[in-house]
Amino acid sequence: MGIATLKSTALTMVAPGKGILAADESTKTIQKRFDKIGLQSTPDTNLAYRKMLFTTPGIEQFLSGVILYDETIRQLIDGIPIPEFLESKGIIPGIKVDKGAWQMVNLPGEKITEGLDGLRDRLIEYKELGAKFAKWRAVITIGDGIPTDTCIEANAEALARYAALCQEQDLVPIVEPEVLMDGTHDLEKCREVTSKTLKAVFDKLKAHKVVLEGMILKPNMVISGKDSSTQTTSGEIAEATVQTFLEVVPKEVPGIAFLSGGQTPDQATENLAAINKVSPPAGGWQLSFSYGRALQDEALQAWAGKEENVEAAQKAFLERAKKVSEARSASSA
């Protein structure tokens, strides 16, 4: 394990003013995105869409890294392997390595992320293909009687095992325990579950001797459920999020790259700005972003699968990336 390499890569991933584009939609997920514009997902249409994003002029000002999918990391842009193309722009290539969240046996409504079998060999291959970091997502659902301790502990253990395997190959692990926005729960319930989940995750990471300085945390913001009767302001979200993280996230972690988790582009941008405004320097970590839909949705709608719309779509993508980047620079001063 090259600890110096891990630390250096992790710090670059959360460099001031920059964040990570999550372009790692699975075949099933990208079809859902394309359904909105009436387009069929194929390797060629997937590549055309991602090429539109990755070739946007100036995007390297706001993006430090891109999370790729297995299909994408093997594709070419103008004859150049995509990881190599991204690196030529100063953007670090990464890879999603989990196999998705599946229903847990005997635990209705709860999921466990799979993909540990054969992961070491897959990481070796992805490193050879040019990946410098990886991502694994765990999903925690709030509902009647859930999440259970069993679900939280099982997902925390999987995240820790994944992270240790990544660092063995000098790949920075993005550790993503997502407490879903789906549900009627209020802000306080989200805070309680988020805190409990993160405590379990860091306990397992330490047990597996994961180098915290060589990882990135990708969590949800503390936010009320989509169907909650009490929706909260960005200021309330920011206060609850920062306070929770100060209590449970070790200072050794170089950066927190928030997921957008179903928020609109404007919501995700506004909430990130509010979080950076209230965050004291005591945390020690950079507060960044790793957004998928919140960065892409406007560009996807503008593109609509048509070559003649590429320029307009790239303009929309660059504008949103700039707004989210500026949200990182918000200050209480």
Image (cartoon, rainbow, N blue to C red):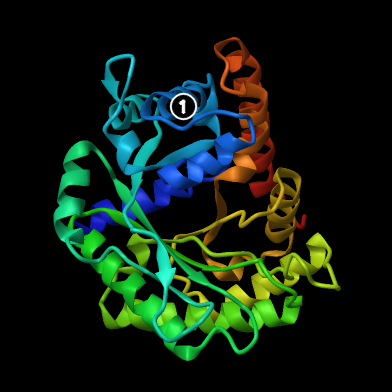
Q: Is residue 70 left or right of residue 254?
A: left
From the top left corner, tell me how far across and down residue 181 is, in percent. Answer: 66, 66
Residue name at image x 56 percent, y 52 percent: 288
**In the picture, residue 260 is in which quadrant?**
bottom right
From the top left corner, tell me how far across and down residue 284 is, in percent. Answer: 52, 66
Question: Which quadrant, please, contains the N terminus?
Answer: bottom left
Question: Which quadrant, please, contains the C terminus?
Answer: bottom right
Give the secondary structure at mark 1.
helix
**In the picture, residue 294 is in which quadrant?**
top right
Q: Residues within 10 Å of mark 1 (few under 14, many from 20)?
A: many
Mark 1 = which residue? 54
Residue name at image x 16 percent, y 45 percent: 125
- Furthest toward the top, the residue is 308
Q: Please tell me which residue lies in front, 110 or 160.
A: 110
Q: Please tell me which residue lies in front, 276 or 240.
A: 240
Residue name at image x 62 percent, y 27 percent: 318
* Observer able to see residue 32: yes
Q: Amino acid at mark 1?
A: Phe
Above or below: residue 67 compared with residue 97: above
Q: Is residue 235 left or right of residue 182?
A: right
Residue name at image x 29 percent, y 83 percent: 207
From the top left corner, tell me how far across and down residue 158 is, in percent. Answer: 32, 73
Q: How many marks?
A: 1
* Observer able to see residue 1: no
Q: Please tell me which residue lies in front, 292 or 215.
A: 292
